[in-house]
Amino acid sequence: MNSVLMSPYLITILFAWLGAHIVKYIISTIKNEKQTIRSYLFVSGGMPSAHSAAVVAMATIIGLKDGVGSGLFGLAVLFAVIVMYDAMKVRRASGEQGVAIHKLIKDLNIKIKLPKVAKGHSPLEVAMGALLGATIGFVVFLSTV
C-alpha cells in the first residue's frame, strides 16, 4: 500500500489535477467570480484544462521514467491526444449546444428544469493545461530520481 501512495506516476497525476483546479480557482477569484475551492475541484471547463494537465503529466512521467521508446509511453501519448481532442471538440460542442438549449428554454418561457451544461475547453485552455502537466511531470521526475 505504501508503494502505491509513493508512486511517482500517481503523485504526478494527482498534483497535475489539483494544480490545475487551484489555478482555476485563483483565476476565478481574480475575476471576482463567486465560487468555492470545493466546487472548483469538480468544475468542467475553464483555464487551464485539468484533464489535459493530468494526461500530459502522466505521459511526461512515463516518458522520463520508462523511456519515450516504450510501448507504455506510446499508449499514454495516444490517450492524452484523445482526451485533449475530446475536450476541445466534442465536449466544447456539447457545451455550446447546452447553452443554446438553455437560452431557447428561457426565451420560450418553458417551465422545465434546465439540463446541466458541461463546458469543454478552448485550444488555449487545453494548451495551458498540457504545459502545466508537462511541467509537473518534469518536476516530480526530478524529485523522485
Image: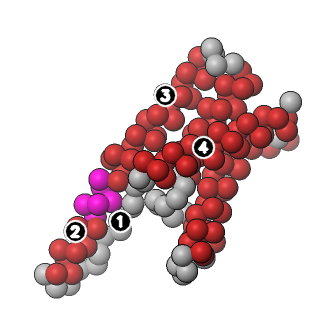
Mark number for residue 101? 2
Q: Earlier in the sequence, mark 3 or mark 4?
A: 3
- The quadrant of the image that shows the N terminus is top right
Magenta range: 93-98
Q: CA distance from mark 3 to mark 4?
A: 17 Å
Residue 78 shows which numbered tag? 3
- Measured as percent of width and height from the top left, residue 26 is found at 63, 69
Residue position marked by numbered label 1 in the rendering: 117
Three-letter amino acid code of the residue under disc 3? Leu
Q: Which mark is residue 17?
A: none
Residues at badges 2 and 4 in contact (C-beta under 8 Å)?
A: no
Tag 1 or tag 2, which sits nearer the N-term?
A: 2
SS under mark 1: loop
Give percent across and percent down for residue 47. Answer: 52, 59
Which quarter of the picture shows residue 5? top right
Q: Quadrant of the C terminus?
A: top right
Few, some or many residues within 10 Å of mark 4 (<14, 14–19, 20+): some
Q: Quadrant of residue 143?
A: top right
Identify the image quadrant of residue 6: top right
**Among numbered discs 1 and 4, the one appearing first in the sequence:** 1
